[in-house]
Image (cartoon, rainbow, N blue to C red):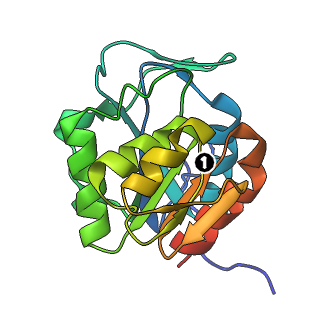
């Protein structure tokens, strides 16, 4: 059966995508995992969920670990969770620069209070720990954070992907496809 819904086209004749909801992607300024971010965004787009990217310094390009470099949509300080169906915190190389960012921590707490999707991979698990949302949850991420996760009341499993209610964590970029599929399942309408 053909889709009889009229598609809106832009000035170049391309179909304008309409999303059912949006997920907030919080990115560090540099060193984030490009590949897993691509998997996550692609999986969300496939279920008609868009993404809105923010960083602490919105006027400077964010730079991925491998090759991605782009300007984000806004600064993390300018957003709140009311418009979004969830939040995705990007893991990066070295220590997570987002783990001490008060606004990012508050956004994660707000998402938890509203029962929205919370996702992180690698060292971004530290953001969830510092926000206090891992208590009683199975989580995974950078193995160097195993003790911190346990001290925060979580159960660190070391698995590739963990799903604990609306919290999804992944160990690293190798979990890309499974992580993206898990995100899509949580926010699917």
Q: Which residue lies furthest to the right in this view?
A: 1
Q: Mark 1 points at which residue?
A: 41
**Residue visible at 30% across and 32% down?**
74
Q: Where is residue 156 in the image (x, y as percent from the top left)?
A: 57, 57
Q: Can residue 145 be seen in this view?
A: yes
Q: Nearer the viewer, residue 17 or 97?
A: 97
Labels in figure, total: 1
Q: Position of residue 31 (x, y in %)?
A: 55, 19
Could you tell whether 50 is left or right of 58 in the image? right
Q: In which quarter of the image is the N terminus?
A: bottom right
**Residue visible at 19% across and 38% down?**
102
Q: Is residue 88 above or below residue 155?
A: above
Q: Position of residue 121 (x, y in %)?
A: 57, 45
Q: Is residue 147 above or below residue 78?
A: below
State the image quarter where residue 45 is shown.
bottom right
State the image quarter where residue 2 is shown.
bottom right
Could you tell whether 42 is left or right of 11 in the image? right
Q: Is residue 47 visible?
A: no
**Residue visible at 51% across and 41% down?**
145
**Residue visible at 31% across and 22% down?**
58
The kind of secondary structure element at disc 1 is helix
């Amino acid at each position: 059966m053909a889709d009889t819904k009229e598609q809106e086209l832009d000035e170049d004749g391309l179909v304008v995508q309409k999303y059912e909801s949006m997920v907030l992607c919080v990115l560090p300024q540099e060193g984030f995992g490009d590949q897993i971010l691509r998997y996550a965004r692609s999986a969300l787009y496939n279920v008609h969920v868009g993404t809105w990217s923010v960083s602490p310094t919105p006027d400077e390009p964010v730079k991925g670990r491998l090759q991605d470099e782009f300007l984000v949509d806004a600064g993390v300080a300018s957003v709140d969770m009311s418009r979004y169906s969830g939040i995705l915190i990007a893991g990066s190389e070295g220590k997570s620069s987002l783990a001490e960012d008060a606004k990012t921590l508050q956004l994660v707490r707000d998402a938890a209070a509203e029962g929205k999707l919370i996702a992180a991979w690698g060292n971004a698990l530290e953001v969830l720990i510092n926000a206090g949302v891992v208590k009683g949850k199975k989580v995974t991420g950078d193995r160097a954070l195993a003790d911190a996760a346990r001290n925060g009341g979580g159960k660190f499993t070391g698995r590739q992907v963990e799903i604990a209610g609306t919290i999804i964590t992944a160990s690293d970029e190798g979990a890309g496809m499974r992580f993206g599929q898990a995100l899509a399942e949580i926010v699917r309408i």
